[in-house]
Image (tube, rainbow, N blue to C red):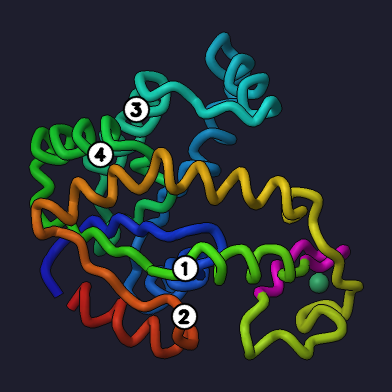
Amino acid sequence: MSKSQIIILFGRSGCGKGTQAKLLIKDFGFEYLGSGALLRERIAKKDFTGKKLKEVLDQGVLVPTPIMFRIWSEKVEEMRENIKKNGIILDGSPRTLPEAELMDHAFEWYGWENIKVVLLDISEQEAFDRLTNRRICKECGQIIPWTADFRGMKVCNSCGGELITRDDDKPEAIRERLSYFKKDVQPAIDYYKEQGRLIKIDGDKSIEDVYHEVKKVIQ
Ligand SMILES: [Zn+2]
């Protein structure tokens, strides 16, 4: 495996990105950089941007590109100074075409050339079905995906807790998230595709089969 890769993971909500990222982290020592965690970390600073971010996120509004990009590039700078891992998995960035272009400039600046762009492809309908049916453990918060392996599960397999549906998994909220993907994220994906950089993996397969394909990409 070549040194210090960057894996940009794309896919509709429910495609299993999180699961695949965890496997890569465990098996190959990648570092995870998720935009959600990044924003929460920034909010915790409680300065102007921190407070404003909280407001914006509570309203469900997209964080503007210049702000998101600044937070993101500060983190990448920090990682660049201190590379301990085999690479970084980006989950949730870029969210738009302008961000994809900015990120390319940033990677060039930081001298990162080994960048893989992976799309875990599931259809809009499949995403909708998975999201409306997935459950979360009331006790420990573990998410139980709506895929063949987990459909029959009655209680949480790590703590025995009750399984419930989340509020943000309600149909209207899910339609919103999926339309965001189509409108904002898809142009970023097309940007990589036009350059011949997009690696598309069928996300309808089992976790194991998808992971098999993902591993081929990074090796
Ligand atoms: Zn649990």
Name the residue tied to disc 3: 69
Residue 76 found in image quarter: top left
> Could you tell which of marks 1 and 2 lies nearer the N-terminus?
1
> Could you tell which of marks 3 and 2 lies nearer the N-terminus?
3
Name the residue tied to disc 1: 123
Residue 187 found in image quarter: top left
Name the residue tied to disc 4: 100
Kind of residue sitting beneath label 1: Ser
Q: CB atoms at circles 4 and 1 under 8 Å apart?
A: no
Name the residue tied to disc 2: 204
| Residue 138 located within the stretch drawn in magenta | yes
Label 1, secondary structure: give it.
loop
Q: Position of residue 144 (x, y in %)?
A: 70, 74
Label 2, secondary structure: give it.
loop
Q: CB atoms at circles 1 and 2 under 8 Å apart?
A: yes
- The magenta region covers 136-145
> Could you tell which of marks 1 and 3 lies nearer the N-terminus?
3
> How far apart, in angstroms, are the residues tagged by discs 4 and 2?
26 Å
Give the residue furthest to the top. 48
Kind of residue sitting beneath label 3: Phe
111, above or below 155, in the image: above
